[in-house]
Image: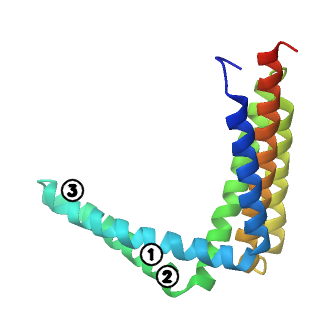
Amino acid sequence: MDGNPNWGVFTATGILLMVLGAAAILFERATSWFVTLLIGWILIIASIFIFGSAFGLGSIGRGLFRALVGVAALVAGLWLVLNPGEGTETLTLILIFYFLVAGVFRIVSGVVERGAPGAVWLAINGVLSVLIGLILWVDYPQSAEWAIGLLVGIDLIFSGWVVILLGQQAKKELSGA
């Protein structure tokens, strides 16, 4: 590790990630719906700003394109807010993509950084993320109602564990052990 990392921040961050992960698992359905509604509202609010910025571009073509992007964000946001059950299916597909891609990147990072502190744990975290993505894919669309909360929770717990391990490694390096 470069520099002089604060191992306490790593440990505290890891613990917080694990607690948030446990809460997401305990309230998996509520988490799934909450995330869907939150993203919907974010898109609705963003659409207002995107649409409003369309008129300041100085070009009718660029302004029209920006306005259409704003309309698309509004439609997507309204769809998620008004249909959170179906929205969780869409978001579950996005999560499948996220877990598979993030997992592969974590594995590659672990392999590229082999020999560095925590590289093995990063690769293991990547393997677990890929497995989560595959589990979701196999059971889709039935898993959509609970998957967001459960799988985000699992990923947060494992990510928190890895961050704690990195913090402990930093502590060892700082103490010269």
Earlier-in-chain disc, 3 versus 1: 3
**Which picture quadrant has residue 84?**
bottom right
Residue depicted at x 11% and y 53%: 58
Residue 100 in view = no
Residue 139, above or below 162: below
Residue 172, given in percent of the width and then of the height, sits at: 83, 21
Q: In which quarter of the image is residue 67?
A: bottom left
From what the image shows, is residue 124 above or below residue 70? above
Q: What is the CA distance from the residue labelled 3 to the residue labelled 1?
A: 23 Å
* Residue, disc 2: 81
Compare residues 42 and 13 and report the one nearer the observer: 13
Frontmost residue, 54 versus 116: 116
Query: Would you call the spot at circle 3 few (<14 residues within 10 Å), some (14-19), or many (20 or more)?
Result: some
Above/below status of 16 relative to 42:
above
Rendered location of residue 49, percent (x, y): 28, 64
Disc 3 and disc 1 in contact, CB within 8 angstroms: no
Could you say which quadrant of the image residue 71 lies in? Answer: bottom left
Q: Quadrant of the C terminus?
A: top right
Q: What amino acid is found at the position of numbered circle 1 in the picture?
A: Gly
Whole-percent x, y for residue 131 in the image = 85, 55
Q: Name the residue under label 1.
A: 77
Three-letter amino acid code at disc 3? Arg
Three-letter code for the amino acid on which mark 2 is drawn: Val
The residue tagged 3 is 62
Q: Are marks 2 and 1 in contact (CB under 8 Å)?
A: yes
Q: Earlier in the sequence, mark 2 or mark 3?
A: 3
Give the SS element for disc 1: helix
**Which of pointers 3 and 1 indicates the residue nearer the eye?**
1
Q: Residues within 10 Å of mark 2 (few under 14, many from 20)?
A: many
